[in-house]
Amino acid sequence: MPSITVLSGGMGGAKFLQGLLHGLRSGQLPYPADTRITVIANTADDLWIHGLKVSPDLDTVMYTLGDGIDPGRGWGRRNETWSVKEELATYGVEPTWFGLGDRDIATHLVRTQMLEAGYPLSAVTEALCRRWLAPVFEDTVRLLPMTDDRVETHVAIPDAESPSGKRVVHFQEYWVRLRAEVPAEQVVFVGLEASTPAPGVVEALTDTDLVVLPPSNPVVSVGTILGVPGVREALLDTEAPVVGLSPIVGDAHVRGMAEQMLTSIGVEVSAAGVALHYGHRAKGGVLDGWLVDERDAHHLSRIQESGIKTAAVPLMMTDHDTTAAMAAAAIDLAT
Amino acid sequence: MPSITVLSGGMGGAKFLQGLLHGLRSGQLPYPADTRITVIANTADDLWIHGLKVSPDLDTVMYTLGDGIDPGRGWGRRNETWSVKEELATYGVEPTWFGLGDRDIATHLVRTQMLEAGYPLSAVTEALCRRWLAPVFEDTVRLLPMTDDRVETHVAIPDAESPSGKRVVHFQEYWVRLRAEVPAEQVVFVGLEASTPAPGVVEALTDTDLVVLPPSNPVVSVGTILGVPGVREALLDTEAPVVGLSPIVGDAHVRGMAEQMLTSIGVEVSAAGVALHYGHRAKGGVLDGWLVDERDAHHLSRIQESGIKTAAVPLMMTDHDTTAAMAAAAIDLAT
């Protein structure tokens, strides 16, 4: 059975996966309906909060594919209640800026208790997916954390009141509380260099027919997955083509805060900037192909010059059919 | 300022405390309205569940006095939601028989996180009471756990499928799942002998004007508090009178499962049986006085013969005034 491996952040990756799965099941793609899909999800924006281990990207993928996501917010559970959050605020417990819904908390309780009993995050994820993915996809879709090790993204922001002039906050605080509205002077991936790929991750990259980088954040989502020692090497080794879709359209991110993150690492905020940052596989990079939006067609020649195959197509994930067409274009570019 | 110390289990103790506080504030008792009340609560039916530390008796007292209790159930929070419970059941997580409401879970999250950060249960309880008791009673009512150590009540029940013919379950499983409908062959207080009184407990017994044993379970509520090494000694030493109210009325418990528990330790299920089990202080027991219900007036002579002062009054806590009258009768008996 053919297989496709997808490196995913949260919302962008989850939405792409929905379109990919829709495309496979509706016959819009040159792969069979029961193609094996392995999702390697970013865990670098995980956090411990109120004593609970929260894995936002794993949960967004799991809830989205398992039809439990709140479609309006794009994260957390549908038909959510907020009693725990209200009570914690009444107790005066900080932080109040990270809202955990009641249904969502059940997931975190199961995860936390399993972790504390000694199970690795990958085993916990597999257990949770027995509820969310197995009933929908049987055993054709697997969700793997990029690593079982604790990795946390922290962001240095300007702080006039601090002697150093800056302050370091957890990525979630930068994103959720500060809405990425202050400059990210530096992004630090605590624990990333010492981490190892979770079981199955390297195999899913080397023993597959296609690797896709969906339009996720190139720094704090796909970038952290690539930062797990062994992942980049697996992508260099694999015989499968590696193709990505630009999260930057018209020199701005479609959603999220890729602009702030790219700026913080000195990468040009454009479809070409990201492509050249990832780099061509023949030159030690990770890409064989890179799909850009029609509006970015003027970047095609620069990308091609680096050796990366490229094409310009509509890249807005407005519905499942449109997203499936993006997946088809990515597959087309890879073959 | 005079002070009264109350040894409390869950519902029975909480209800008595409501009446006592009502009596003080309405001038029905020969103590000033701002009499200091210290509640020493049983923690032997605490449990860890879904990774959370739950202290049922502390919470029942706290929620009841802080006007957060669900009056219908008599435990847990008013306006409760049950999303987490639903979700845990959908995940197939055991046990499903112990229902934690969402609002209640916020309390357990705060408690668990503080315990895991190294705070003792007494400090956690004080922190939680800043929300529940301080706004209502300022600093006149204090709630102390009997101990900061882990103590758990387990119950041996008959089990035909077990080679030994019995099985040991946590007290909460006996009470909540099995509804105390099977005989309790033995009650085991794990950790009780090695426990020490929480800070303030001994002082609250020795440096007070009155000690009251409300109509709580004499085995698994008041009995466990008395079982903390040092507590019984403090009651023998104190100059304050110690007076109790019978939880057995008409040879049956008013609520709960005192009958099963008394039977398991071989104590006669009657107002006199419990009085003689507690014993007269002059003979190494804990009681100076013992209040029984009118229906149990035929027991008075047996109780008096043991040296314990006694009287028969209405002992049903039907409303705050009635309960305040019970408190008045207890005070009257003690003086």
Image: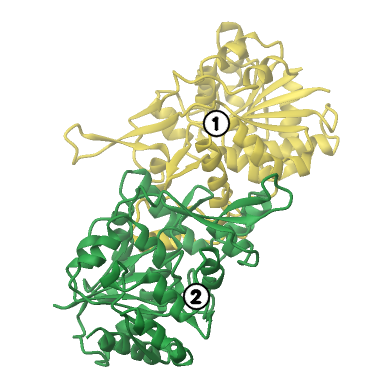
Chain colours: A green, B yellow
Question: Gap in Å between the C-alphas at discs 1 and 2?
Answer: 45 Å
Q: Residues within 10 Å of mark 1 (few under 14, many from 20)?
A: many
Q: Is residue A95 above or below residue B257?
A: below
Location of residue B331 in the rendering, given as x and y in whole percent from the top left corner: 75, 24
Q: How many marks?
A: 2
Identify the residue position indicated by label 1 in the image: B42
Residue B274 placement, left or right of A12: right
Location of residue B311 in the rendering, given as x and y in whole percent from the top left corner: 68, 23
Q: Which mark is residue A74?
A: 2
Same chain for labels 1 and 2? Say yes or no: no
Location of residue A278 in the rendering, given as x and y in whole percent from the top left corner: 38, 71
Residue type indicated by callout 1: Asn
Location of residue B125 in the rendering, given as x and y in whole percent from the top left corner: 62, 36
Q: From this viewpoint, is residue A141 visible?
A: yes
The quadrant the N terminus of chain B occupies is top right
Q: Is residue B334 above or below residue A13?
A: above
Q: Which element carries disc 2, helix, strand or loop?
A: loop
